[in-house]
Amino acid sequence: MNRFALGKAQRRIERATVRYNKLVSASDHPEIVDLWDEFLHDLQAIFNAVGNAAGTNGKSQAWFARKKQERKNDELLQYLHQARHAAEHGIAPIASRMPGLMTIKTPDGVPLFVIPELILDPDFEKNTNLKVAHALPQVVLTVVQNKGVLYKPPTVHLGVSLADRSIANVAWLGLSYHARMVAEAETMVT
Protein backbone atom coordinates (compact mmCIF):
# COMPACT_ATOMS: atom_id res chain seq x y z
CA MET A 1 0.00 0.00 0.00
CA ASN A 2 1.20 3.44 -0.88
CA ARG A 3 1.32 5.65 2.23
CA PHE A 4 0.81 8.91 0.27
CA ALA A 5 -2.38 7.68 -1.46
CA LEU A 6 -3.73 6.48 1.89
CA GLY A 7 -3.02 9.93 3.33
CA LYS A 8 -5.25 11.33 0.59
CA ALA A 9 -7.96 8.80 1.50
CA GLN A 10 -7.69 9.80 5.17
CA ARG A 11 -8.08 13.49 4.32
CA ARG A 12 -11.19 12.61 2.32
CA ILE A 13 -12.54 10.69 5.33
CA GLU A 14 -12.10 13.87 7.38
CA ARG A 15 -13.82 15.92 4.68
CA ALA A 16 -16.68 13.42 4.40
CA THR A 17 -17.08 13.49 8.20
CA VAL A 18 -17.44 17.27 8.17
CA ARG A 19 -19.97 17.00 5.34
CA TYR A 20 -21.85 14.24 7.16
CA ASN A 21 -22.15 16.45 10.27
CA LYS A 22 -23.51 19.29 8.13
CA LEU A 23 -25.88 16.89 6.37
CA VAL A 24 -27.48 15.62 9.59
CA SER A 25 -27.88 19.12 11.01
CA ALA A 26 -29.25 20.72 7.81
CA SER A 27 -32.97 21.38 7.56
CA ASP A 28 -33.29 22.97 4.12
CA HIS A 29 -34.13 20.51 1.31
CA PRO A 30 -31.81 21.99 -1.36
CA GLU A 31 -28.93 22.19 1.14
CA ILE A 32 -29.43 18.55 2.18
CA VAL A 33 -29.46 17.40 -1.45
CA ASP A 34 -26.29 19.39 -2.23
CA LEU A 35 -24.51 17.99 0.84
CA TRP A 36 -25.63 14.45 -0.05
CA ASP A 37 -24.24 14.89 -3.58
CA GLU A 38 -20.90 16.16 -2.24
CA PHE A 39 -20.78 13.40 0.38
CA LEU A 40 -21.26 10.75 -2.31
CA HIS A 41 -18.36 12.25 -4.26
CA ASP A 42 -16.20 12.12 -1.12
CA LEU A 43 -16.95 8.40 -0.68
CA GLN A 44 -16.01 7.73 -4.31
CA ALA A 45 -12.77 9.68 -3.88
CA ILE A 46 -11.93 7.63 -0.77
CA PHE A 47 -12.53 4.39 -2.65
CA ASN A 48 -10.44 5.57 -5.60
CA ALA A 49 -7.57 6.69 -3.35
CA VAL A 50 -7.50 3.30 -1.63
CA GLY A 51 -7.50 1.61 -5.05
CA ASN A 52 -4.57 3.79 -6.11
CA ALA A 53 -2.79 2.99 -2.86
CA ALA A 54 -3.09 -0.73 -3.61
CA GLY A 55 -0.96 -0.02 -6.69
CA THR A 56 1.00 -2.95 -8.06
CA ASN A 57 1.52 -4.82 -4.79
CA GLY A 58 -0.02 -8.28 -5.27
CA LYS A 59 -1.32 -8.63 -1.71
CA SER A 60 -2.80 -5.11 -1.73
CA GLN A 61 -4.33 -5.61 -5.17
CA ALA A 62 -5.98 -8.86 -4.08
CA TRP A 63 -7.35 -7.19 -0.95
CA PHE A 64 -8.73 -4.25 -2.96
CA ALA A 65 -10.29 -6.64 -5.51
CA ARG A 66 -12.22 -8.18 -2.59
CA LYS A 67 -13.35 -4.68 -1.52
CA LYS A 68 -14.55 -3.97 -5.06
CA GLN A 69 -16.50 -7.23 -5.05
CA GLU A 70 -17.95 -6.38 -1.65
CA ARG A 71 -19.12 -3.00 -2.97
CA LYS A 72 -20.66 -4.70 -5.99
CA ASN A 73 -22.53 -7.27 -3.87
CA ASP A 74 -23.61 -5.13 -0.90
CA GLU A 75 -26.90 -3.28 -1.35
CA LEU A 76 -25.90 -0.17 0.58
CA LEU A 77 -22.41 0.15 -0.91
CA GLN A 78 -23.72 -0.46 -4.42
CA TYR A 79 -26.46 2.14 -3.88
CA LEU A 80 -23.94 4.75 -2.70
CA HIS A 81 -21.72 4.03 -5.70
CA GLN A 82 -24.60 4.21 -8.20
CA ALA A 83 -26.15 7.28 -6.55
CA ARG A 84 -22.82 9.07 -7.06
CA HIS A 85 -22.93 8.08 -10.74
CA ALA A 86 -26.51 9.32 -11.00
CA ALA A 87 -25.59 12.60 -9.31
CA GLU A 88 -22.66 13.10 -11.67
CA HIS A 89 -24.11 11.89 -14.96
CA GLY A 90 -27.89 11.66 -14.56
CA ILE A 91 -30.70 14.17 -14.67
CA ALA A 92 -33.08 12.63 -12.11
CA PRO A 93 -32.92 13.70 -8.45
CA ILE A 94 -30.88 11.54 -6.06
CA ALA A 95 -33.06 12.53 -3.09
CA SER A 96 -36.52 14.00 -2.75
CA ARG A 97 -38.60 15.86 -0.21
CA MET A 98 -41.28 13.87 1.57
CA PRO A 99 -43.92 16.20 2.97
CA GLY A 100 -44.87 16.15 6.59
CA LEU A 101 -48.00 14.29 7.55
CA MET A 102 -50.55 14.42 10.32
CA THR A 103 -52.43 11.30 11.34
CA ILE A 104 -55.66 11.54 13.30
CA LYS A 105 -56.18 8.43 15.46
CA THR A 106 -58.84 7.09 17.76
CA PRO A 107 -58.01 6.99 21.49
CA ASP A 108 -56.88 3.36 21.07
CA GLY A 109 -54.46 4.30 18.27
CA VAL A 110 -56.40 3.27 15.15
CA PRO A 111 -55.65 5.71 12.31
CA LEU A 112 -58.75 7.47 11.02
CA PHE A 113 -57.11 9.55 8.29
CA VAL A 114 -53.79 11.07 7.21
CA ILE A 115 -53.52 14.69 6.20
CA PRO A 116 -50.48 16.09 4.38
CA GLU A 117 -48.97 19.18 6.01
CA LEU A 118 -51.98 20.47 7.92
CA ILE A 119 -51.65 22.50 11.09
CA LEU A 120 -54.46 22.24 13.60
CA ASP A 121 -55.29 24.42 16.54
CA PRO A 122 -52.99 23.37 19.42
CA ASP A 123 -56.08 22.77 21.59
CA PHE A 124 -57.55 20.27 19.08
CA GLU A 125 -56.62 17.21 21.17
CA LYS A 126 -57.88 18.84 24.37
CA ASN A 127 -61.29 19.43 22.79
CA THR A 128 -61.74 15.90 21.36
CA ASN A 129 -60.92 12.36 22.34
CA LEU A 130 -58.84 11.92 19.18
CA LYS A 131 -55.04 11.74 19.11
CA VAL A 132 -52.81 13.55 16.61
CA ALA A 133 -49.45 12.20 15.40
CA HIS A 134 -47.10 14.40 13.36
CA ALA A 135 -44.38 13.34 10.92
CA LEU A 136 -42.09 16.19 9.95
CA PRO A 137 -41.09 16.77 6.33
CA GLN A 138 -37.87 14.98 5.44
CA VAL A 139 -35.51 14.28 2.58
CA VAL A 140 -35.57 10.67 1.44
CA LEU A 141 -33.41 8.60 -0.87
CA THR A 142 -34.79 7.90 -4.33
CA VAL A 143 -34.39 5.09 -6.82
CA VAL A 144 -31.34 5.96 -8.93
CA GLN A 145 -30.52 4.82 -12.43
CA ASN A 146 -27.22 4.08 -14.12
CA LYS A 147 -26.93 2.66 -17.64
CA GLY A 148 -30.59 1.65 -17.61
CA VAL A 149 -30.35 -0.27 -14.33
CA LEU A 150 -32.45 0.92 -11.38
CA TYR A 151 -31.01 0.85 -7.85
CA LYS A 152 -33.49 1.11 -4.99
CA PRO A 153 -32.54 2.68 -1.65
CA PRO A 154 -30.82 0.00 0.41
CA THR A 155 -32.59 -2.27 2.87
CA VAL A 156 -29.52 -4.37 3.84
CA HIS A 157 -25.86 -3.66 4.60
CA LEU A 158 -23.26 -6.40 5.07
CA GLY A 159 -26.04 -8.94 5.61
CA VAL A 160 -27.91 -6.89 8.25
CA SER A 161 -31.39 -5.48 7.57
CA LEU A 162 -31.62 -1.71 7.93
CA ALA A 163 -34.28 -0.70 10.43
CA ASP A 164 -33.38 2.95 9.80
CA ARG A 165 -33.23 3.76 6.08
CA SER A 166 -32.91 7.51 6.52
CA ILE A 167 -30.40 9.49 4.50
CA ALA A 168 -28.49 10.18 7.74
CA ASN A 169 -28.17 6.50 8.65
CA VAL A 170 -27.26 5.40 5.13
CA ALA A 171 -24.60 8.14 5.06
CA TRP A 172 -23.28 7.09 8.48
CA LEU A 173 -23.03 3.43 7.46
CA GLY A 174 -21.25 4.39 4.25
CA LEU A 175 -18.82 6.68 6.05
CA SER A 176 -18.12 4.05 8.72
CA TYR A 177 -17.45 1.39 6.09
CA HIS A 178 -15.02 3.62 4.19
CA ALA A 179 -13.22 4.67 7.39
CA ARG A 180 -12.79 0.99 8.36
CA MET A 181 -11.53 0.23 4.86
CA VAL A 182 -8.87 2.96 5.09
CA ALA A 183 -7.85 1.78 8.57
CA GLU A 184 -7.54 -1.78 7.27
CA ALA A 185 -5.48 -0.59 4.29
CA GLU A 186 -3.13 1.29 6.62
CA THR A 187 -2.18 -2.01 8.25
CA MET A 188 -0.77 -3.11 4.87
CA VAL A 189 1.52 -0.11 4.27
CA THR A 190 4.96 -1.28 3.17
Image (cartoon, rainbow, N blue to C red):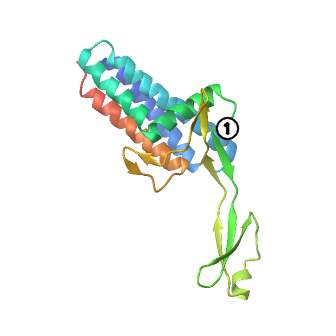
Which of the 4 image quadrants contains residue 3?
top left
Which of the 4 image quadrants contains residue 185?
top left
SS category of the residue bearing label 1: loop
Residue type, label 1: Pro
To which residue does mark 1 refer?
93
Total numbered circles: 1
Which of the 4 image quadrants contains residue 95?
top right
Instruction: Say which quadrant the C terminus sits in.
Output: top left
Residue drawn at x 58%, y 39% as measured from the top left: 36
Residue drawn at x 76%, y 69% as measured from the top left: 119
Percent of width and height locating residue 49: 41, 22
Percent of width and height locating residue 99: 70, 56
23 relative position to 190: left or right: right
**Residue lying furthest top:** 56
Viewer-nearest residue: 145 or 132: 145
102 relative position to 83: left or right: right
Neighbour class for label 1 at 10 Å: few (<14), some, many (≥20)? some
Q: Is residue 83 above or below residue 123?
A: above
Percent of width and height locating residue 143: 60, 41
Residue drawn at x 45%, y 29% as measured from the top left: 12
Instruction: Say which quadrant the N terminus sits in.
Output: top left
